[in-house]
């Protein structure tokens, strides 16, 4: 009996908390919320700087600094490396969110959506957010990532530019249409 | 005890006045056209009060007939509340055909899950069976409203102040009834009356939220322009997912870490 009471109290608390969270932005803010962070470049433009970032983390540079530079310089380099790593992870996060936003608006304006696609996107978003926060915490704790493993990034640059343009255009059109609708509502 | 019963009566009168004020606003602002099921739900609330008042006068408050009259009318009121929530869901997401089809399925699954859970953990013996059923349905109403807003938040669907107020009122009151039915099972008669008064006051809060939002006409919603062709989603959605996967993989790689060399 106690378990039943506790479970119902917990459920009610959870429901009210989630409702307050999902309603935290006022409806007047809705059109602003729907603005897509779109530029003239690809939604993955930050990720494309991977080669430059990777160069910053090359073992050769590190060895050179250890052999030729002072310990103070090596320490400073380590702090700088961490900052660059944090900025890069943050930029990937931005890319992910902007792409996700386009996908959501695309789904909202489509006459038909595929449940599987939406479920996969939701799962990816949850996984990404969790990983992003863990990686960020690790970096803040002074543990640097093994950037040599990040080879997948290079394949991003080889993706078709035509598709990039299509996604961007669709995102802009979707955003415009939703804002018009929200303005009328 | 008598003092408590008087307070209970005052709370009851207060709630009936609140319903009348809300109905006045609904008809004056013309919002009854936009929310016909919500208006019917409020009219049913008033009708139930009238039926119960007559029944209690005729056969007394604690008779079996009064019990039957209460739960029969409550069944109708609860059904209408469910329909009013469905009307809200459709009003918020109905314009977005694609996600409405998806969300209506998810909402149905959520409702079934919540009712199933409530049914599984409830005591179905004797008179408490109706309380258990009512609790399950109220929990489902709150669950549906919360899921609806999660959907709207996720897909960034705009919603009016009126819809927001309706949802908040439904959810707050349903959650209160769930707690009332849960604690009422084991409460002493005095505590039960206190819970009852608290539930009625929360209902008055919901009525105030609804009245404030519905005293002015709700803005007309325009149809979403036919922007995307059927195949746009089919072509672009998998491509976007592939890219999201790629970005995710990049973080998976970053997950594998090494301690920096001294």
Image: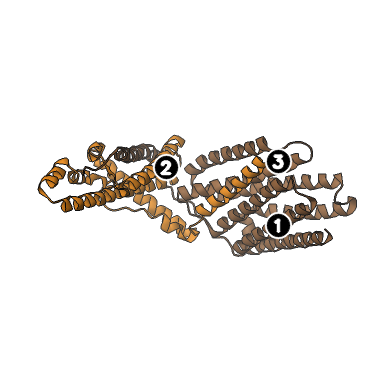
Q: Is residue B136 visible?
A: no
Chain B palette colour: brown
Q: Residue B104 in the image: x percent, y percent?
A: 55, 41
Q: Residue B94 in the image: x percent, y percent?
A: 53, 47
Q: Residue B118 in the image: x percent, y percent?
A: 65, 39
Query: Foreground mark, 1 or 3?
Result: 1
Chain ID, mark 2? A
| Secondary structure found at label 2 | helix
Q: Residue A21 in the image: x percent, y percent?
A: 50, 53
Please name the residue shown 22% across and 52% down the image: A80
Question: How many neighbours does mark 1 have within 10 angstroms: few (below 14), some (14-19), or many (20 or more)?
Answer: some
Left or right position of A167 against B187: left
Marks 3 and 2, how far apart at CA: 35 Å
Q: Are marks 2 and 1 on the same chain?
A: no
Please tell me the numbered disc located at residue B95: none
Residue position for label 3 = B133
Residue A143, picture quadrant: top left
Marks 2 and 1, how far apart at CA: 39 Å
Residue position for label 1 = B198
Residue position for label 2 = A126
Chain ID, mark 1? B
| Secondary structure found at label 1 | helix
Chain ID, mark 3? B
Residue A152, picture quadrant: top left
Look at the picture and state if B215 lies above or below B127.
below
Left or right position of A156 against B52: left
């Amino acid at each position: 009996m106690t378990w039943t009471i506790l479970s119902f109290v917990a459920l009610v608390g959870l429901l009210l908390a989630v409702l307050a969270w999902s309603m935290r932005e006022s409806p007047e803010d809705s059109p602003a919320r729907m603005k897509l962070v779109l530029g003239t470049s690809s939604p993955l433009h930050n990720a494309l700087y991977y080669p430059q970032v990777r160069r910053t983390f090359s073992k050769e540079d590190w060895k050179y600094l250890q052999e030729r530079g002072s310990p103070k310089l090596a320490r400073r380099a380590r702090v700088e490396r961490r900052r660059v790593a944090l900025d890069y992870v943050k930029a990937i996060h931005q890319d992910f969110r902007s792409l996700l936003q386009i996908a959501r608006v695309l789904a909202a304006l489509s006459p038909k959506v595929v449940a599987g696609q939406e479920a996969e996107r939701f799962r990816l978003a949850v996984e990404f957010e969790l990983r992003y926060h863990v990686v960020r915490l690790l970096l803040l704790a002074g543990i640097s990532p093994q950037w040599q493993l990040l080879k997948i990034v290079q394949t991003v640059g080889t993706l078709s530019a035509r598709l990039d343009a299509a996604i961007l255009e669709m995102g802009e059109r979707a955003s415009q249409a939703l804002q018009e609708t929200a303005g009328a509502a | 005890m008598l003092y408590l019963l008087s307070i209970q009566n005052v709370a009851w009168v207060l709630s009936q006045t609140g319903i009348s004020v809300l109905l006045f606003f609904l008809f004056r602002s013309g919002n009854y056209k936009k929310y016909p099921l919500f208006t019917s739900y409020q009219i049913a609330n008033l009708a139930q009060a009238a039926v119960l008042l007559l029944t209690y006068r005729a056969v007394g408050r604690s008779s079996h007939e009064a019990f039957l009259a209460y739960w029969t009318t409550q069944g109708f009121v609860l059904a209408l509340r469910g329909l009013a929530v469905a009307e809200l869901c459709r009003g918020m997401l109905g314009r977005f055909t694609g996600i409405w089809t998806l969300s209506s399925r998810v909402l149905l699954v959520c409702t079934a899950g919540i009712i199933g859970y409530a049914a599984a953990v409830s005591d179905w013996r004797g008179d408490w069976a109706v309380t258990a059923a009512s609790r399950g349905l109220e929990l489902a109403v709150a669950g549906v409203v919360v899921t609806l807003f999660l959907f709207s938040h996720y897909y960034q669907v705009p919603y009016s102040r009126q819809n927001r107020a309706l949802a908040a009122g439904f959810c707050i009151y349903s959650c209160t009834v769930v707690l009332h039915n849960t604690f009422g099972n084991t409460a002493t008669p005095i505590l039960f009356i206190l819970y009852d008064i608290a539930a009625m006051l929360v209902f008055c809060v919901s009525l105030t939220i609804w009245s404030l939002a519905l005293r002015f006409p709700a803005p007309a919603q325009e149809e979403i322009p036919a922007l995307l062709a059927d195949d746009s989603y089919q072509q672009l959605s998998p491509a976007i997912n592939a890219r999201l996967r790629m970005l995710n993989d990049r973080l998976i790689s970053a997950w594998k870490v090494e301690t920096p060399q001294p």
